[in-house]
Amino acid sequence: MEQEKLIKNTDWDLLFIIDACRYDYFETFYKDIFQTGKLTKAISPAAWTYGWFDAVFPDYYDIIMVSGDKIIRSEGINSIKIHDIGKRISTKRYDAPKHFKTIIDAWKHGNDNIWHGKVEGTAHPKDICSETLKAIKQYPNDKIITKFWQVHDPYFLYANATKDLKTKPFKYSNIRKLLYDVFGQEIIWTILDKFNQPSESYHMYIWQQLGRQGIIDGYVNDLKLVLHSIKLVIDKYPDKKIIITADHGEHLGEKGKYSHGGKRTRLIKEIPWYEV
């Protein structure tokens, strides 16, 4: 079912949005943490976060946003430098304060993770859920959305090893995108690696060191961190109507492809819709 319709037509108090969470990985691991609830497959309308918010929440809403994602921030979109989010999405950006009643910048709790090659503040899921608990007390009658940065890279599993990592993006971004869509990243990475070129992305660095399985391990570790953190909120508020979903999926090495933001393949479109 289309996710936009589920969000609009379902009665919920708290909506957790996990970044880049695929349906199949969620289905594999959620039963280890949650004992009740109903899981269904939803179809995301977008391949990246800005496009998702623009499609799902295009107007103004009396909703509280707890944001663990620094591109959804109380200061507004003009406080984000274009080079920080990439030219690929700089032409149309979602200005969150124009759409939500209040934005709580939970992402400011973190300072030990890399964001696009720099040390930046993406908070641990427990910190994000701590802010969610505060928001529930402060706004007891409002709907609340909690948006995680995870399970988007960088991964907590490799935080110490990669905190000083500097990547060098492929110079020609349009050609890069076309090559990735057609051939997948692994072919390009193999060529760059053969000529001793520096890692052009976080995923490439992990792939060079640990292979595809290293990326999957980092992804799964962060997914479990998020789910365990959400469980802390559920345990404190068992009577709340809580939904767990995602903004889009992720490629994890299928046909040599990684990450998201290009074509809306099945793995990008299929996301969880879990009614706790």
Image (tube, grey):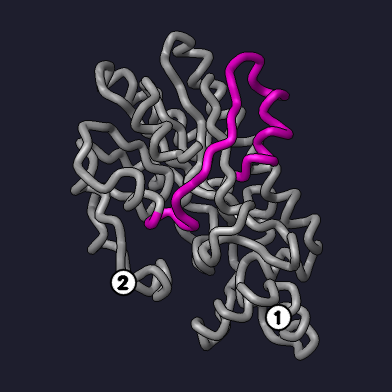
Q: Amino acid at mark 2?
A: Thr
Residue holding disc 1: 188
**Is residue 149 at all visible to an observer of this figure?**
no
Instruction: Please state which amino acid type lies under the numbered disc 1.
Output: Ile
Percent position of residue 158, x then y: 68, 54
SS for tag 2?
Answer: loop
Residue 257, picture quadrant: bottom right
The answer to whether marks 1 and 2 mark residues whose Cβ atoms lie closer than 8 Å is: no
For the point 34% across and 32% down, which residue is it? 8
Toward the front, the furthest residue is: 1
Q: Quadrant of residue 239?
A: top left
The residue lying at 47 percent from left, 13 percent from top is 236
Tell me if residue 28 is in the magenta stretch: yes
Q: Is residue 79 above or below residue 70?
A: below
Mark 2 highlights which residue? 91
Is 48 magenta? The answer is yes
**Viewer-proximal residue, 148 or 160?**
148
Residue pictured at 74% horizontal, 52% vertical = 216
Say which of 143 and 167 sits in front.
Answer: 143
Does residue 220 sit above or below 132 in this rendering? below
Compared across the picture, whether 218 is left or right of 268 comes to: right
Which one is in front, 224 or 182?
Answer: 182
Disc on res. 245: none
CA–CA distance in space, label 1 to label 2 = 26 Å
Q: Categorize mark 2 by other alpha carbons within 10 Å: few (<14), some (14-19), many (20+).
A: few
Q: Quadrant of residue 63?
A: top left
- Expressed as whole percent of the image width and height from the top left, the position of residue 274 reads 55, 27
Question: What residue is rendered at 39% in x and 56% in y?
Answer: 51
Q: Which residues are magenta?
A: 22-51
The percent coordinates of residue 43 (x first, y second) are 52, 43
